[in-house]
Image (cartoon, rainbow, N blue to C red):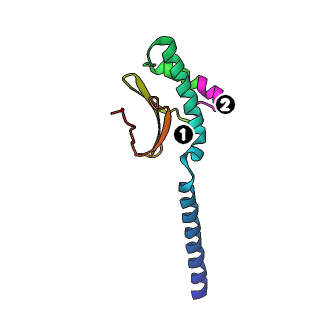
Amino acid sequence: MVKKAAVIFSIILTSLIIFHIIDLRYDLIPYQIRYRQSIKLGNILAREIDSYFLKNGNYPDDWQILESIYRQCYLEAKVKFNESWYHIPPYFERYNDEYSLRYSFGFDGPNLIYYSNIKKWIYGMNVLPAGIE
């Protein structure tokens, strides 16, 4: 009976160690690889939002316009609109003459944020580049 308990305990302990190592390895993967599909879609969205700005002189301020831009970009990226939680469109936020696209992962982050003034994705907990307040 003691041998059986020892074997079960060692199996459970080994499983926990293996799962912990896998979890640590996942965190070591750069965010550019982990969120490749989200970044790809976000880049298409940013391009379309910039082209909307060039045509109309302002950024979209109506959710219906944004939804039509999102749907068009999803078709281009060959992803079904709202296929799963992973493909929910990023949150669009305007700052005077700039904007950001934000994917939130989890309740309080981390976030994957695209800032139009620097044309770059930033991954972290509510990080703001210089010039945006």
Q: Outermost residue, bottom direction?
A: 2
What's the mark number on residue 85?
Answer: 1
Q: Nearer the viewer, residue 108 or 125?
A: 125
Q: What amino acid type should be assigned to the residue bearing mark 1? A: Trp
Q: Quadrant of the C terminus?
A: top left
Q: What amino acid type should be assigned to the residue bearing mark 2? A: Lys
Membership of 71 in magenta stretch: no
Q: Outermost residue, top direction?
A: 56
Q: Nearer the viewer, residue 96 or 86?
A: 96
What's the mark number on residue 27?
Answer: none
Residue shown at the point (42%, 19%) measured from the top left: 61
The magenta segment is 72-85
Secondary structure, mark 1, is helix
Membership of 73 in magenta stretch: yes
Examine the image and state in which quarter residue 40 appears: top right
Q: Is residue 116 above or below residue 16?
A: above
Examine the image and state in which quarter residue 22 appears: bottom right
Examine the image and state in which quarter residue 107 appears: top left
Mark 2 or 1: in front is 2
Q: Quadrant of the N terminus?
A: bottom right
Label 1: how many Cα within 10 Å (few below 14, some 14–19, many 20+) = few
Q: Is residue 21 above or below residue 30?
A: below
Q: Is residue 73 above or below residue 88?
A: above
Please report whichever mark, 2 or 1, sits nearer to the chain's N-terminal start: 2
Q: CA distance from mark 2 to mark 1?
A: 16 Å
Residue shown at the point (49%, 19%) measured from the top left: 64
Q: Position of residue 78 (x, y in %)?
A: 66, 31
Q: Outermost residue, right direction?
A: 78
Label 2: how many Cα within 10 Å (few below 14, some 14–19, many 20+) = few
Q: Which residue is mark 2?
A: 78
Q: Position of residue 70 (x, y in %)?
A: 55, 25
